[in-house]
Image: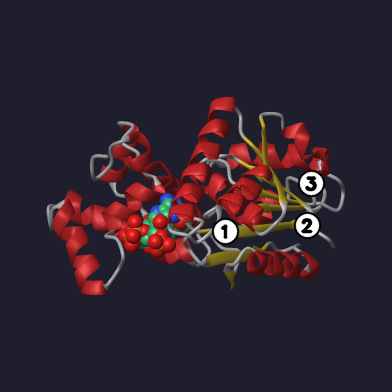
Amino acid sequence: MDIKKFGVIGAGQMGNGIAQVVAASGLEVIMSDIKDEFCEKGIATITKNLDRMVKKERISQDDKTAILGKINTTTNLNDMKDVDFVVEAAVEREDLKFKLFQDLDKICPADTILSTNTSSIPIGRIAAQTGRPDKVIGMHFMNPVPVMKLVEIIKGIATSDETFSLTWELSEKFGKTPAEAGDYPGFIANRVLMPMINEAIFCLYQSVGNVEDIDTVMKLGMNHPMGPLGLADLIGLDTCLAIMETLYDGFKDSKYRPCPLLRRYVEAGWLGRKSGKGFYDY
Ligand code: CAA
């Protein structure tokens, strides 16, 4: 299948990063969100990232113009009517993703592949919302998308081998390295990462260490580029909580219980970098 036009649902930190790498690979992209201001913010972030690359002489001014010229935005999901491949990167809420996949199944041509950037919701459950479960797949990018090399690829129980190989090849076309993970809550990345972050929050909750000390231990002691609390702020504390809930509900194992302090921060609207306050102030 020849992929020419790519749809990205969601213009937030994952969506705009995905749109950027897809456009940089030469494909046409249409990026949708529910409000014009979200689309504008997404384009502003891409522009800022590309400006930084121009300044570092990684790309030329003409490349920047060409990449931006390949990205269109919309607030009307019906504009996905002629895309060959979709990545859904909306908020990590099951009800919302279910509705989006029901709608996309009606709007997109019958052979369009519908992928999801979900960080933890089982692909089979999302695929069951559509009449084309063989063409539904997990394509999980990491944050910040333009920098991180990994794409985790997850087949649902009904995903076809064709859909899988096409998604694998596309990831490589975007300059990423794919890795396959099984369709269980959290896949590999968040099954391993999120309990570590949650445990770091428990250390803070139980005064085992303060924010700086916890992050210093993991940065300097384990050579992680960021401490777990700084990384939680980058990912978004609402997303971290949603992933822990998915692990907890999915496995019914108490080892995945979200730390009460994480819940308190989210309830207070302290969501990390995107809200200006999390474990650090921004
Ligand atoms: N967008 C685009 N580029 C960015 C960026 C962003 N948001 N943030 C940093 N960069 C670029 C910088 O321009 C710089 O580029 P060059 O090397 O080409 O000059 C490079 O990344 C390094 O940036 P900095 O020197 O400013 O800072 P750093 O060395 O501390 O790196 C980092 C920043 C890349 C974010 C690094 O700290 C890191 O790798 N952190 C861990 C990130 C991580 O673990 N991500 C996975 C999160 S989990 C996830 O995404 C899955 C999920 O489902 C929750």
Q: Nearer the viewer, residue 179 or 22?
A: 22
Report the residue marked by disc 3: 83
Q: Crowding near pointer 3: few (<14 within 10 Å), some, many (20+)?
A: many
Disc tally is 3
Q: Classify mark 3: helix, strand or loop.
A: loop
Q: Nearer the viewer, residue 56 or 278?
A: 56
**Residue in the image at 86% along x and 53% along y:** 111
Q: Is 44 placed above or below 4 here?
A: above
Which residue is at a point 41% across and 66% down the rendered structure image? 192
Tag 2 or tag 1, which sits nearer the N-term?
2
Q: Counting residues from the N terminus, which is met first, the one under dot 2 or under dot 3?
A: 3
As drawn, the residue found furthest toward the right would be 110
Report if residue 82 is visible in the image.
yes
Q: Amino acid at mark 3?
A: Val
Q: Indicate which disc, 3 or 1, sits on the residue closer to the N terminus.
A: 3
Between marks 1 and 2 in the image, the one whose residue lies nearer the viewer: 1
Judge: label 1 CB < 8 Å from ligand 1: yes
Judging by the rendered image, the residue that carries numbered circle 1 is 140
